[in-house]
C-alpha cells in the first residue's frame, strides 16, 4: 500500500516545498537537513506497510495470525506429545507390570508410563512435544529403577505427536470456520471439532449414514496415515462415548456418532526404466520408492478435501523421471494394471512392492 513512499520520493516532495531561491542541491544545507527526516519517514512507511499486511488474515503471520484467528474462536493447534505403546517383560519373557509414572528413554527422548492397556502393556507419553516422539521403535532404557524388569520395548504409535500448526494450516482452518459457520452439529461443526483434536490429520463426515440421528466420521492421523485403534478410541470418547448419542461428548444430544479409521490400500508398482550407462535398477530403488511415497503423501494431505483419491500413472512417471540416472520410463502398472487407480472415499494409498526393470 505504501510501496511508493520511498526515501527518494519523500525527499523530492520535501524539497519541492522549499522556495527555488534556496540552494537545494545535494550537499546544500537544506538538502542535508531534510535527508535524515526523509529517511526516517521512509522507514516509518515500510513499518506501516508491514503492519497493514499483518492486520488481515490472508496476509498475517505468526502471532498476528494467531490473534486474528482467535477473535473468531479458531485457536492455533499447539505442538503435542506422542502417545506410544510400551511392552515390558521379566527375565522369563513374561509380561510384567510397571508403576504409572515410571520413566524410560529411547533415541534421546524420555517417555513416561501413563495408562495400563493390558498385561505388561502400557501407554507411554513422550516428554518432548512434536513429531520426534513418533520415529523410534525398539528397546527402551529405564530411567527409574524397575525391580525384575528384563526387557522394555517401544512399539506402536497410538497418538502421533504433532508440531505446532503452521500459518498455512491455521489460515485454511480459519477461512473454513468463517465461511462455513460451524454450529450445532452441522457438517462444518463436526469438521472443526474432530479436525481440531490432537493426532487427527483429516476427517470426512457422513450424516445420516445409518438412519436419522446417526453420523459417521472417518479420520486419518496427523501423520496422514490410517490411525491406530487407540486414536480412534480417543476421538470416539471425545465426540460421543460409546456412540450413545447422550450428549456426553462434543456431539449434540441425539447424534449417535461412529468414529472410523481410513483403510490402507496397498499399491504395488512395476515399471520399465531406461537408464544411463553404468546405472542399475538396484541402485535407484531407494530413490524411486522415495519419489513414489512423496507423491502418495501429496495425495494423503488432500484426502479430507477430496471425494476420493486417484493414483495417476502420469504423475508417478513424472516424479520418477526426475531422478538422476533415469532417461525414460514405460509400461508402469499399479497392482498389475496399466491404468490409473481410483481409491474408495475412505481409503489411503500405501506403497507395497516396487519392481524395476532396466
Image (spheres, helix red, strand yellow):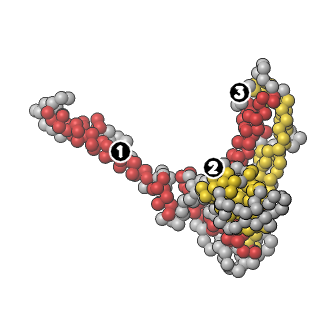
Q: Left or right of 74: which side holds 282?
A: right
- The residue carrying mark 1 is 46
Q: Nearer the viewer, mark 2 or mark 3?
A: 2
Q: Which of marks 1 and 3 is in front?
A: 3
**Which numbered tag is attached to residue 108?**
2
Above or below residue 315? Residue 139 is below
Quarter residue 164 falls in? bottom right
Residue 140 placement, left or right of 354: left
In primary-sequence order, the first of circles 2 and 3 is 2
Q: Spatial distance from mark 1 to mark 2, Cα to Cα?
A: 45 Å
Q: Earlier in the sequence, mark 1 or mark 2?
A: 1
Q: Is residue 325 visible?
A: yes
Circle 1/circle 2 CB separation < 8 Å: no
Label 1, label 3: how far apart the Cα atoms are: 44 Å
Q: Mark yes or no: residue 204 visible.
A: no
Q: What element carries label 3?
A: loop
Q: Residue 76 carries which label?
A: none
* Mark 1 secondary-structure assignment: helix
Q: Nearer the viewer, residue 44 or 259?
A: 259
Assign the C terminus to one quadrant of the image: top right
Q: Residue at x 54, y 62 (%)?
A: 75
The label shown at residue 324 is 3
Q: Quadrant of residue 140?
A: bottom right
Q: How many marks?
A: 3
Element under disc 2: loop
Amino acid at each position: 500500500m505504501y510501496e511508493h513512499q520511498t526515501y527518494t520520493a519523500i525527499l523530492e516532495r520535501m524539497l519541492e516545498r522549499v522556495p527555488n531561491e534556496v540552494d537545494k542541491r545535494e550537499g546544500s544545507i537544506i538538502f542535508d537537513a531534510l535527508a535524515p527526516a526523509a529517511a526516517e519517514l521512509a522507514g516509518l512507511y515500510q513499518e506501516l506497510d508491514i503492519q497493514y499486511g499483518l492486520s488481515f488474515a490472508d496476509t498475517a503471520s505468526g502471532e498476528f495470525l494467531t490473534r486474528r484467528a482467535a477473535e473468531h474462536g479458531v485457536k492455533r493447534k499447539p505442538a503435542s506429545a506422542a502417545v506410544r505403546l510400551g511392552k515390558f517383560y521379566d527375565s522369563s519373557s513374561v509380561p510384567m507390570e510397571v508403576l504409572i509414572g515410571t520413566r524410560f528413554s529411547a533415541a534421546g527422548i524420555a517417555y513416561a508410563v501413563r495408562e495400563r492397556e493390558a498385561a505388561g502393556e502400557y501407554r507411554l507419553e513422550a516428554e518432548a512435544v512434536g513429531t520426534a516422539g513418533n520415529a523410534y521403535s525398539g528397546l527402551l532404557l529405564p530411567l527409574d529403577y524397575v525391580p525384575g524388569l528384563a526387557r522394555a520395548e517401544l512399539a506402536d504409535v497410538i497418538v502421533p505427536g504433532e508440531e505446532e500448526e503452521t500459518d498455512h494450516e491455521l489460515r485454511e482452518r480459519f477461512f473454513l470456520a468463517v465461511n462455513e459457520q460451524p454450529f450445532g452439529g452441522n457438517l462444518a461443526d463436526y469438521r472443526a471439532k474432530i479436525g481440531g483434536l490432537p493426532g487427527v490429520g483429516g476427517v470426512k463426515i457422513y450424516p445420516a449414514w445409518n438412519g436419522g440421528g446417526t453420523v459417521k466420521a472417518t479420520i486419518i492421523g496427523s501423520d496422514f496415515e490410517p490411525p491406530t485403534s487407540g486414536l480412534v478410541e480417543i476421538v470416539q470418547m471425545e465426540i460421543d462415548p460409546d456412540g450413545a448419542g447422550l450428549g456426553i461428548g462434543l456431539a449434540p444430544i441425539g447424534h449417535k456418532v461412529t468414529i472410523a479409521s481410513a483403510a490402507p490400500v496397498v499399491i504395488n508398482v512395476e515399471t520399465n526404466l531406461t537408464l544411463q550407462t553404468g546405472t542399475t535398477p538396484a541402485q535407484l530403488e531407494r530413490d524411486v520408492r522415495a519419489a513414489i511415497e512423496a507423491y502418495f503423501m501429496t495425495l494423503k494431505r488432500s484426502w479430507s478435501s477430496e471425494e476420493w483419491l486417484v493414483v495417476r500413472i502420469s504423475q508417478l512417471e513424472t516424479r520418477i523421471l526426475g531422478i538422476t540416472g533415469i532417461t525414460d520410463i514405460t509400461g508402469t502398472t499399479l497392482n498389475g494394471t496399466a491404468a490409473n487407480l481410483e481409491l474408495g472415499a475412505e481409503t489411503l494409498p500405501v506403497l507395497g512392492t516396487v519392481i524395476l526393470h532396466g
